Image (cartoon, coloured by chain):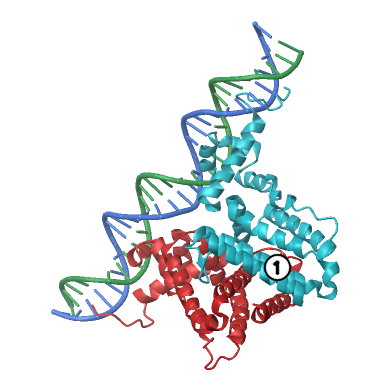
Chain colours: A cyan, B red, C green, D blue
Amino acid sequence: MEKEAAKGIRRNKAQTKQRFLDAIEQILITKGVAALKVNDIAKVAGLDKKLIYKYFGGTEQLMDEYIRTKDFWSNVKGEKVPDAITDGGHAFVEDMLLSQFDYVAKDKAFQKLLLWRLTEQRESLKKLTDAQEANGETLLQSITDPHFGGQSTQFRSIMAVLIAGTYYLDLYAAVNGSVFCGIDLQAEQGRNEIRKALSFLLQSTYKNL
Amino acid sequence: MEKEAAKGIRRNKAQTKQRFLDAIEQILITKGVAALKVNDIAKVAGLDKKLIYKYFGGTEQLMDEYIRTKDFWSNVKGEKVPDAITDGGHAFVEDMLLSQFDYVAKDKAFQKLLLWRLTEQRESLKKLTDAQEANGETLLQSITDPHFGGQSTQFRSIMAVLIAGTYYLDLYAAVNGSVFCGIDLQAEQGRNEIRKALSFLLQSTYKNL
DNA sequence: TATTAAAGTCACCAAGTGGTGACTAATATA
DNA sequence: TATATTAGTCACCACTTGGTGACTTTAATA
């Protein structure tokens, strides 16, 4: 019983597993976490739910595998650390912050993941969080900590506020009337105001901290 | 059939309705929105679910009434606008921001409401949002707009980022390992760093904008 | 005290939920 | 080609879900 190495044949375990993972994402995006039920997942995947138990062990494990296998780093990947940093990472951090603001706005699945993480404790989500933290820690240590020295913790707190701010605003914009503090978060003009605010706050930090 | 004016008697419609509303809050706090099911609500309230349909029309309406009747303004109420403002509202806004940061951390029910609002579109939640916006608008127009003049929109964007930041950090702290950007959001020390960050960013805004 | 309206209970239903055992169908190898 | 193995289907189960009609119990008032 050799594997067929996933050709486009009728019966293919790997392909079928992927179909379920795709179904998860589709439902997540369109209906949210609460709609992730076995019967519906199978319906969307166009396959029998029995296979979910056979291949993943159950819905929970399927969801975990989705979280584990989804690539959330495409936005960060492009951000290679420049060779020489002369501004304490100002330009780099600003770019990261702004592109994150745009990335989260676009990736509906990632939005749901953020929300999911605020709603439920789940090992696979915790893993994702830890990975994000570890990734950030590396950047902070290599780029900004040296520049801010004794104030590095204060800088981290500021970054926490700014990043948290972009997350919340993107999540808020996706659901509500989207006007927050009088700023229309769905309009390009409003989003530009937020970008300017982020840049301003970061600039002030680099100047005054 | 006169009303008994809600004495502590055995059969009392008003009291019974309140019991259901209390049950909603309890479940919301302990298990989250997803756990708001008719049978469970009735069980927690210690009454028959039929009464939910009789008195409210159904679970949906009961939830709506909970959202409508809960007082979310206790944190803002204390914040009476001072008579004379000479600092462009700096002290007032700072106090508002910091006390909001603490209020949201404490009120578990409000946290769930914030989350709910990011998860689902619901008329009663929209109403709550609109009320918040209207309230904020009044403050912005009377206090900060005059001070910032042509930059008032930019100031609003900054406030949006800062408020959104406190919301997200409080929500995040309530669920996860609670370390965000290397800051421990459950430890008093970490929360103090965030407070300092908020104050610093606001101060910079008042100085440099 | 008898009557009546409302408060509250209970048994029951239909639809949806997660989950499984027994089956059929395809396919790799002996 | 025969056979074992795995992919995939299907019918079915027990339980939970939202929801209701028929009932009993309380208590205000004629």
Task: Name the residue at 58% across, 70% down.
Answer: B157
Where B86 sits versus A70, above or below?
below
The subunit carrying tag 1 is A
Which quadrant would the N terminus of chain A be assigned to in this image?
top right
Residue type indicated by callout 1 = Ala
Q: Is residue D24 left or right of residue A43?
A: left
The x and y percentages for residue B70 are 46, 75
Where A29 sits versus A161, above or below?
above
Which quadrant would the C terminus of chain A be assigned to in this image?
bottom right
Task: Name the residue at 67% across, 70% down.
Answer: A200
Residue position marked by numbered label 1 in the rendering:
A160
Where A137 sits versus A109, above or below?
below
Where B143 sits versus B105, above or below?
below
**How many numbered marks have been drawn onto this rendered protein structure?**
1
Q: Is residue C2 left or right of residue B86?
A: left
- Residue in the foreground of this view, choosing between B65 and B78: B78
